[in-house]
């Protein structure tokens, strides 16, 4: 059986790019096209449909149309919430989809906001959904599910951070030293994870699909969705999307004047910054002494991954180099005792 594993859509993640709604529409439409062309039998969306709690009407319309388009494919769709979809401990931003499902407007979509087991007899498949892999007894629940299920395909869908997973950023690779321990569980056909934006294997048959596209300048390629054959679930195929624009970080001005297609962040010294920039350069940041200050911080507090998170966060928010430097100076006062905590920023 072929299934599509999609995650970390993050509609509204970057409202600063020109006509960002069109950018996300291209992504969502192409996801439907890929799923339809591959003739998959099931779609799993493992969390983070929205990026922020204060979703705009345009973002809600875009997400709703996408969900309806997916429903029209006529195959089972599992739409599970992620941490970015949470509005409160008991509510998520998927409530409107849940309402459509309850009133029979979505006939093929299962909206999941809490721990659930979904049964698909015609596909000989049972699916365990746990929106937060950090819950107590996570692996115990998974093992119990496998023991009870009589189906050929036993699939896990969850969201959260596994210890040892990594994110590939423009500034380098960040490895997470906290989170749930990744395990190979005998009898599990496939584990579909969400939360980390880099596609990767967690255990023999458990994968993060990663985000379908770059959401900002801090994220690196490749991106896409996973197409999984349950008879060979250890080797899913990452299918990239061609229509959404790419994010490029340039540290040199193209000599021939040929700028790459997509969104561009230009980071050169002030004396090399062109007086007039093409419209595709939506972010420019003169290079200053931030690197020198960061090295000073490393000597005083140790090799903390907080610096990588700071780089990625500030780059994503398009913060100027001057403000990068201010943040680095604030970090110089960190208590060296914190270096052992290694917590996510």
Image (tube, grey):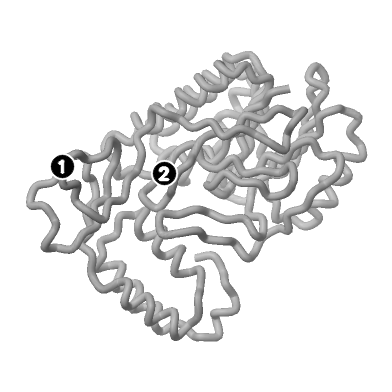
For the N terminus, the image quarter is top right
Q: Earlier in the sequence, mark 1 or mark 2?
A: 2
Query: Residue placed at 64% from the left, 20% from the top?
Result: 40
Question: Quick check: 246 above or below 249?
Answer: above
Look at mark 2 in the image and give the residue it sits on: 215
Query: Residue placed at 62% from the left, 55% from the top?
Result: 165
Which secondary structure, mark 2? loop
Residue lying farthest to the front in this orientation: 256
Q: Observer-nearest residue: 344 or 298?
A: 298
Crowding around mark 2 (Cα neighbors within 10 Å: few <14, some 14 to 19, many 20+) is many
Which image quadrant is residue 75 in? top right
Q: Observer-nearest residue: 330 or 4?
A: 4
Q: Is residue 303 left or right of residue 127?
A: left
Residue 258 at x, y percent in the picture: 19, 39
Question: Quick check: 145 above or below 27?
Answer: below
Question: Quick check: 158 above or below 31?
Answer: below
Look at mark 1 in the image and give the residue it sits on: 256
| Cα gap from disc 1 to disc 2, whole angstroms | 28 Å
Q: Is residue 299 left or right of residue 128?
A: left
């Amino acid at each position: 059986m072929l299934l599509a594993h999609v995650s970390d859509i993050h509609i509204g993640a970057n409202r600063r790019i020109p006509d960002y709604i069109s950018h996300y529409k291209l992504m969502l439409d192409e996801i439907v096209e890929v799923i339809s062309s591959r003739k998959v039998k099931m779609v799993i969306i493992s969390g983070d449909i929205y990026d922020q709690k204060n979703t705009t009407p345009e973002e809600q319309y875009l997400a709703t149309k996408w969900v309806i388009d997916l429903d029209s494919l006529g195959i089972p769709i599992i739409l599970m919430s992620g941490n970015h979809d949470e509005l409160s401990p008991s509510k998520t931003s998927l409530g409107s989809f849940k309402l459509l499902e309850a009133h029979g407007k979505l006939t093929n979509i299962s909206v999941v906001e809490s721990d659930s087991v979904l049964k698909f007899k015609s596909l000989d498949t049972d699916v365990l959904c746990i929106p937060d892999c950090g819950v107590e007894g996570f692996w115990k629940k998974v093992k119990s599910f496998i023991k009870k299920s009589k189906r050929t395909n036993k699939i896990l869908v969850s969201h959260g951070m596994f210890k040892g997973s990594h994110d590939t950023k423009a500034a380098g690779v960040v490895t997470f030293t906290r989170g749930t321990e990744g395990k190979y569980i005998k009898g599990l056909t496939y584990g579909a994870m969400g939360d980390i934006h880099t596609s990767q294997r967690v255990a023999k048959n458990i994968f993060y699909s990663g985000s379908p596209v770059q959401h900002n300048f801090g994220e690196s390629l490749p991106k896409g969705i996973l197409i999984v054959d349950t008879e060979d679930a250890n080797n899913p195929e990452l299918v990239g999307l061609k229509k959404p624009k790419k994010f490029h970080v340039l540290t040199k001005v193209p000599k021939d004047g040929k700028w790459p297609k997509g969104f561009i962040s230009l980071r050169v010294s002030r004396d090399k910054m062109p007086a007039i920039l093409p419209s595709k350069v939506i972010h420019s940041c003169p290079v200053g002494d931030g690197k020198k200050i960061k090295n000073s911080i490393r000597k005083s507090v140790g090799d903390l991954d907080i610096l990588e998170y700071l780089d990625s966060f500030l780059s994503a928010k398009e913060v100027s180099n001057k403000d990068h430097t201010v943040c680095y100076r604030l970090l110089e006062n960190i208590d060296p005792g914190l270096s052992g905590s290694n917590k996510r920023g």
